[in-house]
Amino acid sequence: MCGICGYVSKKNITLEQLKAMNDTMYHRGPDDSGEEIYEARGAYQVGFAQRRLSILDLSALGHQPMHSANKRISVVYNGEIYNFQELREELSDYPFRSNCDTEVIIAAYLKWGISCVDRFNGMFAIALYDRDSDEVYLVRDRIGKKPLYYLQQEDGIVFASELKAIMAYPGFPREIRQEVLSRFLYQQYINAPDSIFRDVYKVGAGAILRFRAGEIKTWKYWDVKQIYRKQAGRPVGSYEEAREELKELLKKSVVSRMISDVPLGSFLSGGYDSSLVTAIAQEHSDTPIKTFSIGFHEERYNEAKYAKAVAEYLGTNHTEAYIDESDMFDLVDSIPKYYDEPFADSSQIATMLVSELAKKQVTVALSGDGGDEFFCGYNIYENIRQAQMLDGLGALVHGICHLPGMRQLKAEERLPFKVRVIAGNREKECQTQFGAGNYIVMAKAMVQNTRQEEPLPVHYLVESEYGIKNWQIRRMLLDMDTYLPGDILCKVDRASMKYSLEARCPILDRDVMEFSYRIPHEYKYAKGDKKHILKEIAYDYIPKELLERPKVGFGVPLDKWLRGPLKEQLLDYSSYDYLKKQGIFDADYVSNTIQSYLKTGDGGPATGANYSKMAWPFFVFQQWYQFYCGGVNGQ
């Protein structure tokens, strides 16, 4: 686990400037660093740098940038290739010097070319320079576990694991891309390929970028839609076959992620996913696995007691820490520093806290991420099933409400909220993304459109691309393309790396993901039982009574904070004069809306509705803007 950065440019960038970029990511790799500059064809220079968090082969032989024995290939890399030992056996004719997976990447490229990534099973962001072909490749893992940004310029590209390294590149303009802001305010994160800055993009999950002679080409080597269609076309024959094969794949995945030359543990919330991962890890460990959970004094949010019961049953070496509101609040100011792009999923705070707890004892932690998206676990999936069942009736109600006389009476606005949502859900390209229309209106109205570019729609208008009639499956695939890499995995990466902790996700193993597409949906959603097949496997390890309970969400008291200790800061950020100078938001609309919210708890027209959901991402953006862009007049 590391941080990487570099460039291909005709500018004369010094080694000291490259080092300054690299050092912005010290937290991602405190154990070692390396920076090198190479002369390329066409007056280009290639700069490669890496901050290292030593996990495998702790010796100096794991230092990066790393080069092939014949000096043709140079690589900087962030992540883990979990099947590197099997690949190494296939590449036995290469003169390996180290025992780390970075050198396997080099050997694999020399034998198979860039298609070698098809053979990698892991989480990774790779930058590779081939001197023979004069090409630089940027590669990101299949599901987007590891981040990789790039700045596109006339004379080259700049890349990095985090935006702050690109911001340190000499002459970077830090120009906000306003077209993404409405979507950010609504979704609370910015999904690939977009970023908050103009001309800066994310390499997509499962994507490759090639830079050669001033030209950029990108393509997908692993695509959720294509892999799903291929795998779903050959479904598993029976439930028992699916159950047994999935169980074996999960075992293999967990065991491969336990390979480490540093202490390893597991996040344990007491839910199905983390409990199953921990149980398999404990089964394959000679000593008690170290497990970590945080608890909340507010009972409705507290899962620590469940985690403790699972830990006691499994016999792990368990550590828990109870936190209060002040512990959470103390982390608010650190959000922009470590989430160096606006990111407003407030569960990031709990993730930072449990990462801090784990880092005191381990350097690697297993997590249960991915179970909900791949096995139908979120509560929204039940709502989506009901919405599809009622869609015909919703279309009828919508049609009646839009008859000439009914339209004048604004009949649809008089309907109960749930009926109004179903009736108004007519856009085929985002039919599984229904929600409160007033949030959509507000997200669009808050941003000042000062450019010719069309703002991005707040929803992802791509659902027809999946070709799936079942709304649940369609939304799961959409979440794999958007919410999982853009929110969940970003949250875990930044929170864990804040404390130089590597998080590994066994459920996001390539073989587990691809096999999940072969499992018939009725095995995942069985008569209303979400994540059914995964639960049944968990019961092989842990009694049902320790796991079966309603899903508990983590709640940060955003409304209490925004209308309490953060009120003055929010007022400053939303004052008419500040917004007018900033030139990003609609000063009149935002100033009035925020003041109304702070006084009454609503945003104006929809009396009684709590608008902390919109005020929080606005606050997070302004906090980020002040931290990285100097606020307004340096304030």
Image (cartoon, rainbow, N blue to C red):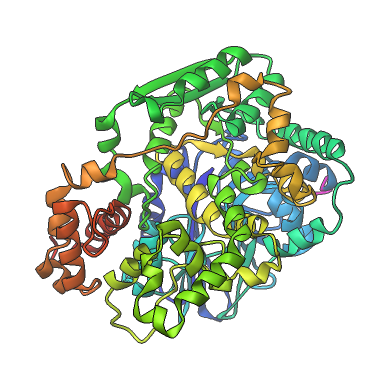
Decide: is 115 above or below 386: below
Q: What segment carries the magenta color?
A: 91-96
Q: Position of residue 406 (x, y in %)?
A: 41, 78
Decide: is 301 above or below 226: above
**Quarter of the image where one finds residue 62:** top right
Decide: is 101 above or below 361: below
Q: Is residue 555 visible?
A: yes
Of residues 592 and 221, the one nearer the viewer is: 592
SS majority, magenta? loop
Which residue corresponds to the image point at 54% horizontal and 32% vertical from the top-left?
364
Decide: is 262 above or below 181: above
Q: Is residue 109 visible?
A: no
Is 349 left, or right, of 575 in this rendering? right
Quarter of the image that includes the N terminus: top right
Which residue corresponds to the image point at 38% horizontal and 54% vertical from the top-left?
343
User: Please, which residue is most extreme toward the right here?
Assistant: 237
Which residue corresponds to the image point at 68% horizontal and 15% vertical from the top-left?
286
Quarter of the image that includes the C terminus: bottom left
Is 120 left, or right, of 340 in this rendering? right
Q: Position of residue 77 (x, y in %)?
A: 58, 51
Q: Position of residue 301 (x, y in %)?
A: 40, 30
The reply to whether the magenta stretch includes residue 314 is no
Q: Position of residue 20 (x, y in %)?
A: 35, 55
Is 561 left, or right, of 458 in this rendering? left
Q: How many marks?
A: 0
